[in-house]
Structures are given as C-alpha cells and as structure tokens.
Image (cartoon, grey):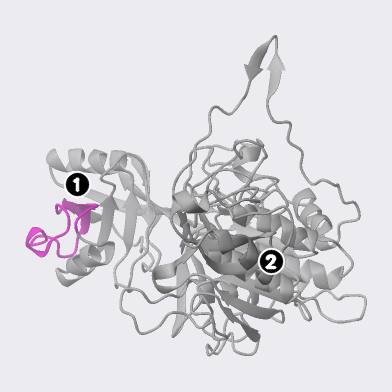
Amino acid sequence: MVTDQFYTEAEIQNQLASYPGVTLRRVFKHALPGYVVEGRPEEINKIAGAKHISPVRSYKTEYTSSNIELIGGEAVRGSYDDKGQRLTGKGIKVGVIDTGVDYNHSDLHRNYAGGQDLVDDDGDPMETKGRPGMDTLHGSHVAGVIAANGKMMGVAPDAKIIAYRALGPGGMGTTEQVLAAIDQAIEDSVDIINLSLGNEINGPDLPISLAINKAVEKGIVAVTSSGNAGPNIWTVGSPGTAAKGISVGASTPPLKTPYLELNQEKIRLEPLVGSVKWNADRSLEIVEAGIGQKKELKTAKGKIVLVQRGKLTFTEKAQNAYEAGAAAVIIYNNTAGSFVGNLETEVDIPVSAVSQEAGKKIAKALKRGTQFARLSFVSEQDILADFSSRGPVTGSWEIKPDVVAPGVAIASTVPGGYLSLQGTSMAAPHVAGACALIKQAHPDWSPAQIKSALMTTATQIKNREGHLYRTYEQGAGRIQVEKAIAAETLVLPASLHFGKFLLNDRECSCFGQGKTGGRFRCF
C-alpha cells in the first residue's frame, strides 16, 4: 500500500479503524511511503488514501580468483586512497539482502558487522539450517564474493557485511520482507546494498524498484541482479528494472570450454557447476543410456554416456553413471535449446550439458554404429551467459542491465565450506564489491557518480562470432574497476533512453512487445 507521504503507525491505525477486517502488519519509515496490511482484497481495495495497491509477491534465490582478476579487483588492491590506505573496501558497509549469512564461516566472521532477520523478526540473520531440502546458502555465497577475507578473498575483503535475511527457508521471501530489509538498510545508513533476487515482472514501478530508487536518493548505492530468464529480450525482472539502481547481467570469467569432436564436428559442452574437469588425453567411445537409470548403464564402463534430461536429478544421473564405471556424462535437454545446471554433490567424473539439437545429433550418429569422440578446449572469457536476462524495461523502455560481471562457475563461501554457483546472483556482488572499492577511493562520490564511473569505463563484450552484444543485452559492458576508480570524466546520467516515438504517424518501437507476470525469485 503506497501513500502520498510517510505516516506514523498511530496515524495509519486511525485510518484503518473503519476497516475492521484489515490488519496492519508493517509500516515503512524510509524505503517508500506506505505500509503492509492483511485482509480480503475487496476490503483492502476500499481503503481511502492509497496511491497504489500492490499484492505481496514471492521472491527466491537464483543460482574467486580469475573472475576478480578479470574485473581489475586484484590490481586495485595494490592502489591507495588519499589517506595512504590500500583500497580493500575498508570503512565501507555493504548490506546483503538475501537468505542471511553464515557469520561463523572462517572467511566471513571477521567482516560480519551484524544485521537483521526480517523473516523471523529478530537480530539473528543466520542462513536457514537444519531443515532438509529447505536449508539455504545463497546469501553466504553472495557475501563471500563481496568481502570474503580468509582462505578466499572477495572483491573488497575489508568491507563490512551487514546481513538482512529477507528470504527464508528454501530461499523464498515476500515483497513485505524485502521492503522491510531495504527500509532497515536505509535506517542503518549502509553505503551499498546488494539484492541478488528478483521476479519475472518487467516494469519500472513495482514497490521494490521504487524502494531501491528511494534508497539511492538517500545516498545508498543499490546493486541488483538482472535475472536468469534470458536469452530473450524483455526478460529483465524487478528489482533489476529500478531506474536508479545498477542492474547486473552475467558474463563468463576466463574459462577453458570443452568441445566434443565427433565426425569432424565440434559440439560445445556446458560443464555443470560442481563437475570435475574434462581430460582430453584420449578418444573415448560414446554410448546412449536413456535417462540415466542404473538398468540403462550396463555397457557404460570406460565410456562417455549420453543421457536425456528428465525424471532423475542431474546428480542421480551422474552418480549412476559413476557407479557403472562411466568415464563422463553428457546430458542433453528434453526441450528446445540449451541449459545450465548444478550438481548437488561432487561426482568424480565430468558432467556436461548440451542442447536438445546437439543431443539428438549425437544420438543419430550412434544409431549408425560405434562412435568415438575426443575433447578439445577453447579459452573463452567475456561471453554473455545464455541465462542472463535482457532488457529493455517495459513502460519506460529503459536500457537494462546497466553492466555485466562474471556470473558463471563462481566459487565462493557457503555454510561448511565453498561451492561454485552461477547466475546473475553471482554477477551482482562483483559489482557491489567494486562499488565498495570505488567508494573508499572517492568517499564524496554520489551513487549516480559511482554508477557512471562503472558504466563509462566498462568494456563492451562480443559473442563467439565476434559481434558486439546489443546494448539491451550487456548494458555498457563488463566492469573494469581499476579504470572506474581512475575515471577523470563522469557522464550524468550514465545512460539515456528515448522510449517510444511516432514516425510518419505510426507508433514505432524497435524491441517489440513486453511481458508481465510471474513470481519473484533470487537470481
């Protein structure tokens, strides 16, 4: 419920006295003028004085070294601010609005500086633990990319992490909880907030996006993930649509990408996160094994196994193949297009994904007789991840994302250890950490100036065919924090958009029609 100004709880209770079926749940003090109520929709819609009524939606999580080096983070650590201190994020407070943080982790505990649990409404923002299938790790992974300081080093290892647990068991949360976290972060005067979460609704005026704009107006740099709904246009979701926030898409860090060479054709393999690396020392026979059930793997020993996606989890397929003595597993999609995925636990053989088209091509070759294949590797970096959501924003036609950062196969902290994950959730904290370094170097810069420095010094990236990605796919490009800190010219606003226009009395648009609908989730 958004109002025309900020009201006290007593004033709102007085306004709601005429609506006995409506219960006040929470009043926001900073993020946006408004409050949350509970009741039947027909009664809520009768409340006078509301400028905008929005339903509470659900949010959930979406799922370092070479990646930090790529964006210039390691080079910056050898630089100094005007006080002679190394640029490590020292003195900067970063609010992580997520699933909580494992503040007992050896790489996180020294940087943890408190927080708030907006799910259980207490002061303990620990990750969800002890609930099989519902335990969380996402917030700890994000916090590690920003500021781990131990065995692993984050982008800004001396920045302070303030944890706001807005997403509870299973990585799910609501509009109310996320708004409350933004509200609390404003009250706590953090310097930067990171929201690696979102939904599929593409529009500039959802409450979370409005609250992010308000936080920026109050001097907080707001970094959001753009979403994992790519590669089509119009897929960026709120809060990645917030005009004043920094919306981040996902690119690849330096990777050696494996290719399967079969009958003089190269097929790109997408290693599942958590998979061991491929070994290209010899040719191996390929066999097809249905969906990877144990009974389908009787001839798998010493061979590459081709299985179809579906029914069993990726880990179950891989584990069955490993127990059957297979040398590697290729999982092909059961719908059109390619996919990416994670293994729940490590399996000691390589596991990769290919598109449905590529899988059927291999299966067709196998029907002609015994087939042997070998592996080759191509070094790649700065390729836009297929899953990374693209813009523009519906209604405003604003270009989003603003920048991209590494978001594929990113190793970071999780409860009990370390794990590689991928998603725009992993890209956003690279930018949040970069903002901490810039803020230390230039404490007087506003959020708009920091955003401008990142965008005006970003490097544009190209696809595998050598063509530049479009602006509404990569924004200004992949961040270069060393150059951003050294920027001598800042362009404000950092980007322009011109909306729709009329040409010869016809409405003209170059992007097609937008879409709305969906549920919030973490990216």
* 455 is higher (above) or lower (below) than 406: above
Q: Is residue 343 left or right of residue 180?
A: left
Amino acid type shown at disc 1: Gln
Q: In the depicted view, which residue is nearer to us: 508 or 468?
A: 508
Location of mark 2 (residue): 11
Residue 49 is tagged as: none
Q: How far separated are the C-alphas under marks 1 and 2?
A: 76 Å
Q: Position of residue 372 (x, y in %)?
A: 22, 50
Identify the residue at horizontal 69%, vertical 30% (top origin). 499
212 to 419, vertically: above or below: above
The residue wearing badge 1 is 371
Residue at (47%, 66%) from the top-left corner?
Answer: 173
Asked if residue 72 lies left or right of residue 487, the reply is: left
Q: Secondary structure at mark 2?
A: helix
Residue 181 visible? The answer is: yes
Name the one closer to the observer, 203 or 23: 23
Look at the image and give the residue range highlighted in magenta: 285-311
The residue depicted at 49 percent of the width and 63 percent of the height is 20
